[in-house]
Amino acid sequence: MTDEREDVLDAMDWLLDSLEANDAVSYAEVGGVYQEKTDAVVTGDGPRSATEFTETGVWLRVFANGAADYRYTNSIDEESLTDVADRAIRSGEVLAQDQPGRFDAYTTHRATHGGWSEEGIESVDVDEKVAAVEAGFAAAADLDLDRRWANYVDAHIEEAVGTTTGSVIQTTLDRARVEFSLTLADGAKVRRHAGSTEGAAFLEEIPDAIESAAADARTLADADPVDVPSGETTVALSPQAAGQLFHFVSHYLEADADYMGMSPYEVGDRIGPETLSIEDTVHAGSFAARAYDAEVKPTAPTRLVSDGRVRRRLHNTTTAAEEDTYPSGNSVPSLGFTEPPRIHARHLDVDASDATAAELEADADVYVERFKKPWLRDEFERVQRAGVFPASALYAKDIDDMTEDRPECGSAEFPIAEAYRLDDGERNGRVDGMFLEYTPDVLRSVSRIGDARGTVTGVCEKHKSQIPFAVTAPGLLLEAPIEKGT
């Protein structure tokens, strides 16, 4: 074991002992993290930057006076750790949270998980990682492009976590991702994200991902822009566009969003057709996979929707105790650990049905391949989602008590990134400058669910925390307004 790894473990143990001895602390989690990381930017002219570096740090989440605070530091000497712990304790004490948070004082986990990679991503030279991206760009050599751009990021993460109630786990995770774009000369852009926790094996997927995007870019380039009448429209969504929509909807199934008064759905509500079933899972090797969450809970599948009805929300330990249920490992750490873990879906798995892609498109007026980032209509919701929030989920109830009813909560504009006008199931020109208007009842208009599924991955920001996500979903046929963008 290297000196850096030993130093992190020693710092974690010292800090955990210090917090256990502090009467102001009712409960705490402490994690020691060793990371070997790569960050590279590649353009059509070659690599713009490519760096490899090692990062060590310690994170802690402390319950004091009924509220939790979270901190992360790269300074792991005793003086710095004492200062970080004191600030976390003071922050919890002054939060003035009306309802004290709860934690699991009885269940103890002791485990080791070695991750899902046969070969760690840190074992591959940075030049090979850049070469994988450049090999993908070669597939787009025939396109008339203004710009090729990619950001490749990975981290080999060795983490040990201990709690003041006796849980101790050690995990290894190789998470890698690439975000890239191909900008056509006429201004249209194909933007993609691909990610995995399979270690070095992910590098073999990068050229295929970029080649697939290049094929989509050719289709866009060959299609002339056409007008689409505004208003209620029959829309066919690709599996990737449907996945983006389901990821958006899953935020309203998070317990803290409900406590904040930002969810239009109650448990038992019909959200879609009887054929709609959604499970939050942890697929081995998935970009969003982890064996244990930030609260040292094993990650387990959770059935969120069945027969078209909401069956359960996503919980951490505190909100699960409030609702007299059990947590399933949904306290997801932020990428880089600099921000608090958040209640979030891991890998949404949406059941397929029996409609072929041709059948979905035959009855539609517009086919959507991908969306851009949605824009929330409710200003309060926009501000709260993007703003800083304590690491204490029950503080959301205090925010809800201070606000009024928000009739547009749960509504959003989904700008269309790649879409086509359909005539009798055939593509007849591309759709530019439009958005799909989402309201909480849109999924109830789903008339058909596809038989083939696809996976979309990405990074979602929740209260400044960067959370990895993945969705595997089938295509959909639904009714929704399509409007001109501004």
Image (cartoon, rainbow, N blue to C red):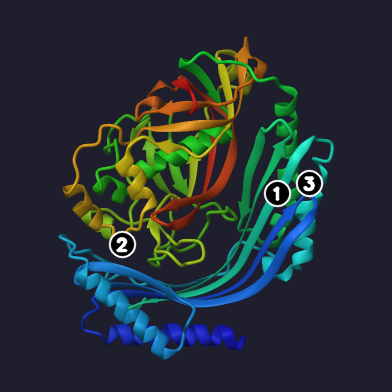
Please tell me which of labels 3 and 1 falls first in the chain: 3
Q: Nearer the viewer, mark 1 or mark 2?
A: 1
Whole-number angstrom distance, CA of label 2 to CA of label 3: 42 Å
* Residue 19 x %, y %: 31, 83
Please tell me which of labels 1 and 2 falls first in the chain: 1
Q: Is residue 27 left or right of residue 416?
A: left
Q: Residue at x 47, y 72 (%)?
A: 111
- Residue 95 picture quarter: bottom left
Label 3 close to label 1 by CB (< 8 Å):
no
Which quadrant is the N terminus positioned in? bottom right
Question: Which residue matches tag 2?
Answer: 390
Question: Which residue matches tag 1?
Answer: 149
* Residue 35 x %, y %: 58, 73
Disc number placed over residue 391 in the picture, else none: none
- Of 100 and 52, the residue lying toward us: 52
Label 2 close to label 3 by CB (< 8 Å):
no
- Of 122 and 116, the residue lying toward us: 122
Name which residue type carries label 1.
Trp
Q: Residue at x 30, y 32 (%)?
A: 408
Q: Residues within 10 Å of mark 2 (few under 14, many from 20)?
A: some
Question: Which residue matches tag 3?
Answer: 137
* Residue 256 x %, y %: 29, 51
- Which secondary structure lies at badge 2? loop
Q: Is residue 421 left or right of residue 350?
A: right
